[in-house]
Image (cartoon, rainbow, N blue to C red):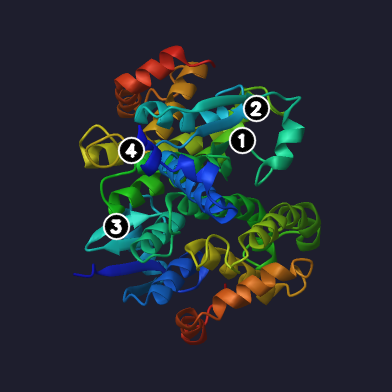
Amino acid sequence: AMPQYKLYYFAFRGLAEVSRQLFALAEVEYENVGLTPEQWKEFKPKTPFGRIPVLEVDGQLVAQSLAIARYIAKQHGLAGKTPFESAWVDALADQWSDFHRVFKKYWYLRLGVRPGDIEGSKVSVGIPARDSFFPLIVKQLKESTSGFLVGDGVTWVDVLIANAVEDINSKEPEFLSEYPEVVEHQKRVHAIPALKKWIDTRPPSTN
Amino acid sequence: STFLFKTSPFPLLFFSNFHSKVSFFVEFLTICIKLRGYCRRIMPEYKLHYFGIRGLGEVPRQIFALAEVKFENVAVTREDWPEFKKKTPFGQMPVLEVDGKFIPQSFAIARFIASQHGLAGKTPFEAAWVDALADQWKDFQNDFKKFWYLKLGFGEGDVDAAKVEHGIPARDKFFPLVVKQLKKNGSGFLVGDAVTWVDVLVANAVADLEEKEAGFLAEYPEVVAHQKKVHAIPALKKWLETRPY
């Protein structure tokens, strides 16, 4: 029997969007719980690490957005076809995570989530982070030749990267202009029918 | 001997036309390639490339040791690194070379070896919990290193101030979660009833902390007990006693 899935997060895209997209891509039903700040205060002590997103699977919770994404992906053939491919999916995801950890110091200013010198941060943090990471994605896309990052089909790291790229382009359209292959990849991933359907019908969100 | 002469392929090489010789050669080559593929699947050649220090290479090494899987431990010198860097996928180490192909990123490497040798949880949900704890450790490390790197002598700054501002808060945010999970799980290991790669990851970090700042985890005796339990596992204990650095 299919497990009962509930994905808990705030009611915006953020760190839960990749998992929502994976459920959509796998065409798997789940309950998409968007917590209000008040509901979050109540729910927080019940979570493993005091953070969201968490995924509830038949009543049991698991935390950490990438662990959740990998779990969903593996159950539904979206994590590479061999152990070696899965390792490459994981490696690219961790490389994105390293990039994002640095990049967000600029990006949260751009989003207006935190105050600060946006233009100064763009030069000192945003651009160097971008130019350390996206050449690796371009290189991998060229080596892969399938149009997807690993192997000959879409994996969860394609969804992860495409989501990040869409977010960047929506707020700073020219930021990835030197990486057309990356933007093409995002369009290709988001054109997959099951994913396109989610993107066209998902609730509006600021980020 | 006439039987062998008539049934073996070798007479074909001498007596047949060119087309038969080529067919024989192609078949022979196909068999060799299939045999090599089979051998690689059952016993791949592993080389772990990192600097000659523990660092980010140590957890992958310990996973190999725990799984009792042979690997070549390649220590890249500072002089050789700039050249080798160009060959790596992301310009970083560690990289694991598997029959000549690279895998970067220490957690991807650890999980790759672990999941093929029963060290990544017994079910998909357990594997997800192993991954979640590992990523939680990574979040901790990202905050903690603002103190720890100064303590190890990297960068400029006031070590004692960093300990108060970064080290202690990071510790007190992360290790209660480890204690909670150990108690909830009840087996002595973090996930399920057997050791997984996240036990190795956390125990390695704990041993390093205790070695360089004795007593830092005095308020977390369950965590220190866990480290001792993991490091007492015979295959791992042997590595710890004989490792090169």
Give the x, y percent position of residue A63. 38, 55
Q: What element carries label 2?
A: helix
| Chain where mark 2 sits | B
Same-chain check, marks 1 and 2: yes
Q: Do the CB atoms of the residues marked 1 and 2 lie less than 8 Å apart?
A: yes
Tell me the kind of residue under disc 1: Lys
Disc 4/disc 3 C-alpha distance (Å):
70 Å
Per the image, the residue denoted by label 1 is: B146
Per the image, the residue denoted by label 4 is: B3
On residue B150, the disc is 2
Tell me the kind of residue under disc 2: Leu
| Sequence order check, earlier mark of 4 and 2 | 4
A171 left or right of B168? right
Q: Is mark 4 on a helix, strand or loop?
A: helix
Placement of the N terminus of chain A among the 4 image quadrants: bottom left
Please report the residue visible at 64 percent of the width from the left and 62 percent of the height from the top: A141
Per the image, the residue denoted by label 3 is: A61
Q: Which residue is outermost to the top?
A: B241
Give the x, y percent position of residue B164. 56, 31
